[in-house]
Image (spheres, helix red, strand yellow):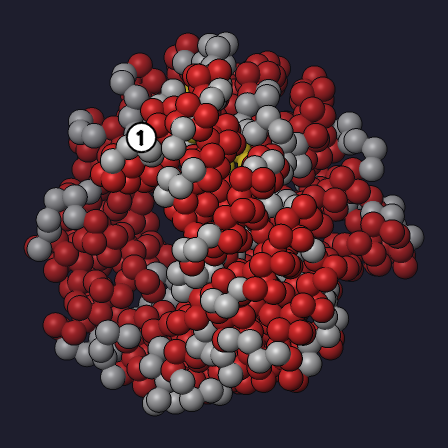
């Protein structure tokens, strides 16, 4: 092996100017050279390269710079299978700051096809398969002839399957034909899996024969685990997603029938895969929950189904559609066991009142009461538990148990006690009898229990409670002192202890809990009593410091708002926000810009000097909805404001922010065409909120969030129709 030829040009790369996952890439040349060393050195170098060039699917600039040397090493026989796998993942990865722009990592690997393609004929099966995948992930038609030729000769079933997948990527137009040929030719199971998925990818008609063919291959995990990556690793779920993405009744029905059939299979692992596909369908399709609910609910009554723990969160997602599961869930709760608490939590989401009654009834004897309350409180704090003397007494016993068994800083104790305290806080004076127990816990953890102590405090105990709060506010941890002083302010209206805590926080060392942002938020609500804090608030401003961290800029934005409220001079707020926006320009600090936009919207026309900075945010899609809201509020809405927001919503960019912006603009701001676009978002089958920006995984709260967005969109459209009928001209957004 001629290492000189392998590493030619490696020292010409400006590695110090190139970044990998953890900073500068000066270490990459040494790691690349180490690949050609002894086994231990080479193995360690390969592990390091995987960690820094490619992290969770993201390819860094150093990864692209390393591609030529990785390809040469593989071609020279240095760990060819492993390096080709790495090259394939780089080709399939997401670019991060690549100078070549989107697709740069794929293009970098494609440029090395002359080194990669000969390896598809390698005698080692692993190397052939890795070479095929790397070539396929480039999606470069230049690989077509070689891959097609290899498929005609290849005997190994796994490599044949990989070849079919690769050919679909480099020649999409021929994917459906090749897939049908593979199914007709009686290929091996791996290849049939790939044929079915590529057929769905290519948009070919999905027939009952396709459905039955896929069902015979379930469970698919033994065929794909460790062999295929990404969507091909979950074929049933992927096919369901592809069919739903076609967005027509025929393919939707085909997707639902595929899932329902898979849920009825005898094999437990096959049904587990079907369960995942069903949940995925419900998170994508608005029509899926009512359609699939009967098949899913049937599983909880099926004693042969071995994956009840995995079923429970799916039923929770279904909400009202899973009401028929309530009796079975009740039986799980009453039977105790490891699933009882989770079943009660799911029941709370499906039928809250039934869960609340069951939970209350469960509080029989003293020992059971404590166990149920302490163990279940974290999961069930949202239950609509109505006050009863019996339940209050049970919670008091549980709080005493937490107090007597207290372990300092123990997360479980804090969490359980805090959740129980939230119930009592909601009951207010009805829970006054629990003041002694809450007071005992307050002495142990003031920040967690201060609010509850004030909420339940009866008139006759106000003086004693106030004295306790004053003492706590005078010494101790900053967060505890702040909580006590804030509670004292709520109980008595006294501001002096709170001002003292805030003053010290503004002059002392930074605190992880009582941050400068939190201090500013509190100070802004003190009115004239907080004027003494103004000099210190001004002194803490950091936006003029070059490269100020995002957290400091967030605190500055909060400080600007507080200064305006305290001095009653909106001009001071505007000046600070203008400085913060200037400091944030061109930096990846979206929360800072969003907070500034929100503050500007709150100020209204007084924030008009911020218009140029806010208009600059319109070019950043993630911030455009907030910018539109602010510009409308200050009286300088951009042309086509509703269109800008709808563009974002249709691309799944901050849908909740988009609806907020449209609500600010008002129903009258929508043209007929824009109203039709909003109606399409509200009434189509595919959910609006599929993935959070930048997230690959689908969010678990998709259904609830999408339902809320749909209701808001429908309300806005109804308001527009009403104004169209009545001829009213007043925008509801104008008074926001």
Q: Taking the image as drawn, is residue 353 in sight?
A: no
Query: Left or right: where does residue 721 sit relative to residue 215?
Result: right
Vertical position of residue 545 compared to residue 657: above or below: above
> As rendered, which of 563 and 512 lies closer to the eye?
512
* Residue at (49, 62) in percent of width and height: 159
What is the count of numbered marks?
1
Residue 726 is situated, as x and y percent measured from the top left of the image, at 89, 57
Q: Quadrant of residue 380?
A: bottom left
Vertical position of residue 392 compared to residue 557: above or below: below
Residue 451 is situated, as x and y percent measured from the top left of the image, at 31, 45
> As rendered, which of 661 and 469 lies closer to the eye?
661
**Residue reaching furthest left?**
404
Vertical position of residue 301 compared to residue 180: above or below: below
* Residue at (22, 70) in percent of width and height: 372
Local crowd size for mark 1, using a 10 Å CA cut-off: few (<14), some (14–19), many (≥20): some
Q: Taking the image as drawn, is residue 440 in sight?
A: yes
> As rendered, which of 92 and 517 lies closer to the eye?
92
Mark 1 highlights which residue? 34
* Residue at (28, 76) in percent of width and height: 340
Q: Quadrant of residue 153?
A: bottom right
């Amino acid at each position: 092996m001629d290492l000189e030829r392998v590493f030619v040009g490696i020292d010409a790369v400006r590695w110090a100017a190139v970044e990998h996952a953890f900073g500068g890439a000066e270490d990459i040349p040494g790691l690349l050279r180490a690949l050609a060393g002894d086994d231990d050195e080479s193995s360690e170098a390969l592990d390091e390269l995987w960690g820094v060039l490619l992290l969770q699917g993201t390819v860094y600039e150093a990864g692209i710079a390393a591609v030529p040397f990785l390809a040469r090493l593989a071609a020279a026989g240095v760990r060819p299978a492993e390096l080709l796998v790495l090259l394939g993942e780089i080709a399939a990865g997401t670019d991060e700051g690549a100078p070549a722009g989107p697709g740069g990592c794929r293009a970098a690997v494609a440029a090395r096809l002359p080194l990669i393609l000969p390896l598809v004929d390698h005698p080692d099966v692993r190397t052939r398969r890795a070479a095929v995948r790397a070539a396929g992930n480039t999606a470069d038609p230049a690989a077509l002839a070689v891959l097609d030729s290899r498929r005609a000769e290849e005997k190994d079933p796994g490599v044949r399957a990989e070849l079919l997948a690769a050919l679909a990527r480099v020649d999409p137009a021929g994917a459906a034909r090749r897939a049908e040929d593979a199914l007709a030719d009686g290929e091996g199971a791996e290849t049939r899996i790939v044929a079915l998925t590529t057929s769905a990818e290519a948009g070919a008609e999905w027939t009952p024969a396709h459905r039955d063919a896929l069902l015979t291959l379930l469970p698919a995990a033994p065929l794909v685990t460790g062999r295929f990556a990404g969507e091909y690793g979950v074929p049933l779920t992927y096919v369901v997603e592809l069919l739903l993405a076609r967005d027509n009744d025929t393919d939707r029905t085909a997707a639902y029938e595929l899932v329902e059939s898979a849920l009825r299979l005898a094999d437990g692992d096959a049904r587990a895969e079907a369960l995942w596909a069903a949940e995925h369908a419900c998170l994508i399709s608005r029509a899926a929950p009512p359609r699939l609910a009967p098949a899913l609910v049937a599983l909880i009554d099926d004693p042969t189904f071995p994956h009840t723990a995995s079923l429970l969160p799916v039923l929770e997602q279904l909400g009202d559609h899973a009401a028929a599961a309530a009796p079975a869930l009740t039986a799980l709760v009453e039977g105790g066991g490891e699933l009882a608490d989770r079943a009660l939590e799911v029941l709370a989401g499906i039928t809250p009142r039934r869960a609340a009654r069951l939970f209350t009834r469960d509080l029989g004897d003293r020992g059971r009461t404590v166990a149920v309350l302490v163990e279940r409180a974290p999961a069930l704090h949202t239950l609509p538990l109505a006050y009863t003397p019996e339940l209050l007494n049970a919670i008091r016993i549980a709080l005493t148990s937490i107090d007597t068994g207290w372990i300092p800083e123990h997360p479980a104790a804090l969490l359980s006690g805090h959740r129980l305290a939230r119930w009592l806080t909601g009951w207010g004076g009805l829970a006054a009898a629990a003041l002694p127990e809450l007071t005992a816990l307050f002495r142990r953890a003031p920040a967690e229990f201060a609010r509850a102590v004030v909420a339940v405090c009866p008139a006759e105990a106000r003086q004693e409670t106030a004295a306790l709060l004053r003492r706590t506010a005078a010494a101790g941890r900053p967060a505890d002192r702040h909580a006590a002083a804030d509670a004292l302010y709520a109980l008595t209206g006294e501001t002096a202890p709170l001002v003292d805590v805030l003053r010290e926080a503004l002059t002392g060392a930074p605190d992880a809990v009582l941050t400068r942002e939190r201090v500013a938020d509190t100070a802004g609500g003190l009115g004239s009593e907080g004027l003494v804090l103004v000099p210190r608030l001004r002194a803490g401003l950091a936006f003029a410091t070059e490269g100020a961290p995002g957290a400091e800029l967030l605190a500055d934005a909060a400080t600007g708002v507080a200064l305006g409220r305290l001095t009653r001079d909106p001009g001071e707020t505007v000046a600070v926000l203008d400085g913060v926006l200037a400091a944030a320009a061109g930096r990846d600090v979206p929360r800072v810009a969003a907070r500034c936009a929100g503050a500007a919207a709150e100020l209204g026309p007084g924030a008009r000097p911020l218009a140029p900075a806010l208009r600059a945010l319109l070019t950043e899609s993630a911030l455009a909805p907030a910018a539109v809201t602010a510009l409308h509020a200050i009286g300088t809405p951009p042309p086509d404001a509703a269109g800008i927001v709808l563009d974002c919503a249709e691309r799944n960019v901050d849908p909740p922010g988009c609806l907020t912006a449209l609500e600010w603009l008002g129903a009258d701001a929508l043209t007929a065409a824009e109203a039709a676009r909003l109606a399409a978002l509200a009434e189509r089958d595919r959910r609006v909120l599929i993935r959070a920006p930048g997230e690959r995984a689908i969010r678990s709260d998709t259904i609830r969030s999408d339902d809320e967005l749909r209701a808001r969109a429908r309300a806005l459209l109804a308001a527009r129709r009403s104004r169209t009928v009545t001829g009213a001209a007043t925008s509801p957004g104008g008074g926001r």
